[in-house]
Amino acid sequence: MKNFYNSSDNQLVQSFLNGSNKALEILVTRHRDKMFSTILFLVKDKYLAEDLFQDTFIKIIDTIRNNRYTEEGKFLPWAMRIAHNLCVDHFRKVKRAPAVKTSDNQDIFELFNFTEDAPDNKMIQEETQERIRLMLNLLPQEQREVIVLRHYADLSFKEIAEITECSINTSLGRMRYGLINMRKLLTEKQISL
């Protein structure tokens, strides 16, 4: 059995094309955290993020198997673009779907609490992440998206520009204004880290 752990993404894609499911498993494991956290920050729902993450890799597998993968050496940005597009598609679909409201005009799904708290998570880390999430949610969508892709997916500004279909200068500007706005939120809203 070939050792794939030191292989590049492109070598893993080629090995998968040659029939190695282990190569695909390593590729998924290698990029799982970055992709999932980015999707989660975009959709803000753990279960939806899990579904979109699975849909992303199904689409990736189908594309590779049908010999339509051409992004040599740029697997992660290509995969992130697929994930981003699936998130956008989801929001478009949700906009068209009618919301189910209660008699007092609340969304019916806001009444249910589906989250589970893991008892072994550190409370301080959770509070910090929640404060950052709150600040990110207060930012305009374009600024939030660039910050998430840069800091949580660890993408370059060139890769972010490709994914969001804007210029590098625009993505840099969105990052700059997003960070400025987060600093303002820290002082104005008294959100302390």
Image: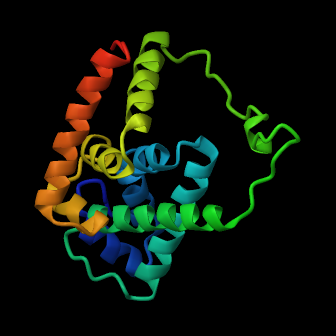
Residue appearing at x 79%, y 42% in the figure: 105
Q: How many marks?
A: 0
Visible residue check, residue 156: no
User: 111 or 1, which lies in front?
Assistant: 111
> In the picture, residue 118 is in which quadrant?
top right
> In the picture, residue 175 is in which quadrant?
top left
Residue found farthest to the left:
169
Residue 122, percent across and down?
A: 48, 13
Up/down of 113 relative to 165, above or below = above
Residue found farthest to the bottom:
67
Residue found farthest to the right:
103
Residue appearing at x 20%, y 41% in the figure: 177
Up/down of 44 relative to 80, above or below = above
106 left or right, relative to 133: right
Residue appearing at x 36%, y 39% in the figure: 139
Residue 4, percent across and down?
A: 31, 59
- In the rendered image, the quadrant that contains the N terminus is bottom left
Residue 151, percent across and down?
A: 26, 40
Up/down of 145 relative to 52, above or below = above
User: 46 or 111, which lies in front?
Assistant: 111
